[in-house]
Image: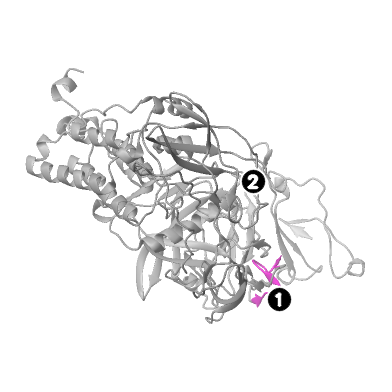
Amino acid sequence: MFCAGNYYYMTHWNDMVNRTAVLTMEDAKYANQGIYSASYVGDSPLQGAWMRLIVRDCPSKKWGQTCDRDCPNCLNGGVCHDVDGDCICPPGFMGTRCETACREGMFGRNCQESCESCGSEAKCKGLRFCLPDPYGCSCASGWSGSRCDSPCHTDMYGPDCRLSCKCQNGGVCNRFSGCQCPTGWRGQNCEKSGRYHHSYSVTNNNIAIGISKMFECVVFRIFYYTVTTSDKPVGKIISCGYSEPPVPTSAPKLLEKRSKQLLVMPVDSHRGDGPIVSTRLLYKPVENGDSWSSIIGFWNTDVFTQLWLSIAIYVTTLRSESLVFVSLLTLDCLHHQGEETILQFNSGTLTLTRRPKPTPEPLTYPILEWEDIKFEDVIGEGNFGQVIKAMIKKDGNKMSAAIKMLKEFASENDHRDFAGELEVLCKLGQHPNIINLIGACENRGYLYIAIEYAPYGNLLDFLRKSRVLETDPAFAKEHGTASTLTSQQLLQFSVDVATGMHYLSDKQFIHRDLAARNVLVGDNLVAKIADFGLSRGEEVYVKKTMGRLPVRWMAIESLNYSVYTSKSDVWSFGVLLWEIVSLGGTPYCGMTCAELYEKLPQGYRMEKPKNCDDEVYELMKQCWRDRPYERPPFSQISLQLNRMQEARKVIGEEKLTFIGRILQLNQAQGG
């Protein structure tokens, strides 16, 4: 065995086992790395075997200066870089953990390079790729051999065909990308159960009480699209039974009356099937003379179902005064009877209307083919997902798009919110002030959502980049302004968002995360509402779990009771308006979340930003009113802002005070 002019090992050919010579290095050093060849003595080295030895700084699956940091689990043959800890993905795969397969014949960091441009017309056949150490060189995914022209054998895939598929649950091995999972399964080996919901289209039928009946339903695949699957609908038999919604049999018992609190014992008996597991809330004034009532949004026919969080609402009449009670019950086990709950309320009113859970409708969305997506650059990345700019082909036309995808280690809640975002985008339809859906694509069990591309990024960064006081003081002094944006443009952002939220509320959707960071700036500086991962298509939404919460943008009722309505979005819009006026300032800067929980119910609100128009600040304060029903609807907000915009067009830009001239030249000259 020969390397760099030195013989390292020699043996008689009769001593070789299976025609294999083994060279062992006990303590590898950088000096040992290089290209090794093995050949018969006297033969040309060109007729021998060649091998390149790479010496890493750190042991396998470790990285860092002291090799004390654990590498991520690089998938599909990826190798961890021992200096920066990133996964070096083999040709044909991409992603932070090499979890995403490129379409056949594509490679590169974002699968944007084509083998056809390298002279190969057979999906990278005959090409060898050399990547940064410690990866080295290999054939493209799907090929092996000294000339990289041998396709992988059955159940093998990846670079040099070194990886075994080990597909489960009916998955099929593809030599380029690995396991292709059937509907309802995902993961590296199709080992994880379905991530996305299915919708069922059921014909209306009438049945008698107490009778069970079998219905034949047609199942439509909503979040999956597989080209190898027949287009014919899949038949499935489901069992349908009758159940009666639970109704309380008595009013809550008043135990003690205080100045601002009532101590009551909630009802513990209901007529009908199953315990209450959750409710829907609707803010509206109570009419005098209404009798007590309890509204159940969902129910369960199994009386042994465990209660996790139940909210019961009662309206009763005491001494001819109509009062409203909100009871927040946190039950850890079955039927904690006689449990006392403090009910907090103010002079506002809160009632409910009974509405059964709507039957889900089949969801349809434009399907994009994986081969029609050409990824370009990563334009946004978070802890659990990323956004990649791409060029897509739809209906024969090429267009820029932003592709949203989740990372491999995202939680089930993240997947549920992601699938919910697609559902919201489908149901919302097209609007100039909402980021619109182009289509969606499923590849290897993972969902990719294509939305329209906004060239100027999110509004928060756009506002901050416009500041010139710090970046260009000379420009600021010369023009007497704090921003490269005009007052008209800043006010137009507010108009655009209000118009989009008016459309959203008319569609009975709650955004729940309205903020400048979730508004995108498109062509012609048009603001478009985005990020519908937390949106809900309901009049009122009660959050059951504690996740990542945008506390500084949340309304009082959302902070205290986890209740979200369109009026909660109005509060958030007031904070967004403050962000625009302050050119991307941080709301409640210097205050902790704990201080917000304490001070907001006491009446604390953010002060008027410098040189903010009184009319604009008054609108902010209207959005921040304690009682949700006293906040203006988005229809009124949109109308007010449009009137302000029209008035300022008449007045002229030089007299605007919305944000504009916060520098006085005489003050600037005086230091």
Quarter of the view holding residue 289 = top left
Q: Residue furthest front?
A: 319
| Label number found at residue 82 | 2
Residue 500: give x, y in percent of width and height. Answer: 30, 52
Q: Residues within 10 Å of mark 2 (few under 14, many from 20)?
A: many
Q: 99 or 180, which is in the foreground?
A: 180
As helix, strand or loop, the secondary structure at mark 1 comes to: loop
Compared across the picture, whether 670 is left or right of 227 comes to: left
Q: Which mark is residue 315?
A: none
| Residue 425 horizontal side relative to residue 59, left or right | left
Tell me which amino acid carries mark 2. Answer: Asp
Q: Which residues are magenta?
A: 150-165
- Please give the name of the residue rendered at 68% of the width and 63% of the height, measured from the top-left corner: 191
Residue at 40 percent across and 49 percent down: it is 511
Extreme residue in the right direction:
15
* 322 lies above or below 138: above
Residue 366 in view: yes
Seen in the picture, residue 471 relative to 28 is either above or below; the reply is above
User: Could you tell me the amino acid type at mark 1?
Assistant: His
Residue 317 colored in magenta in the image: no
Q: Does the segment drawn in magenta span residue 160? A: yes
Q: Is residue 514 above or below residue 258?
A: below
- The x, y position of residue 15, in whole percent, is 92, 66
- Magenta part, dominant SS: loop
Report which residue position mark 1 lands on.
Answer: 153
Q: Quadrant of the C terminus?
A: top left
Q: Can you give x and y, in whole percent of width and height, for residue 215 in the image?
A: 58, 76
- Name the side, left or right, on which 27 lies relative to 557: right
Q: Nearer the viewer, residue 303 or 593?
A: 303
Please state the horizontal and vertical placement of residue 263, each as a whole percent of the image.
52, 30
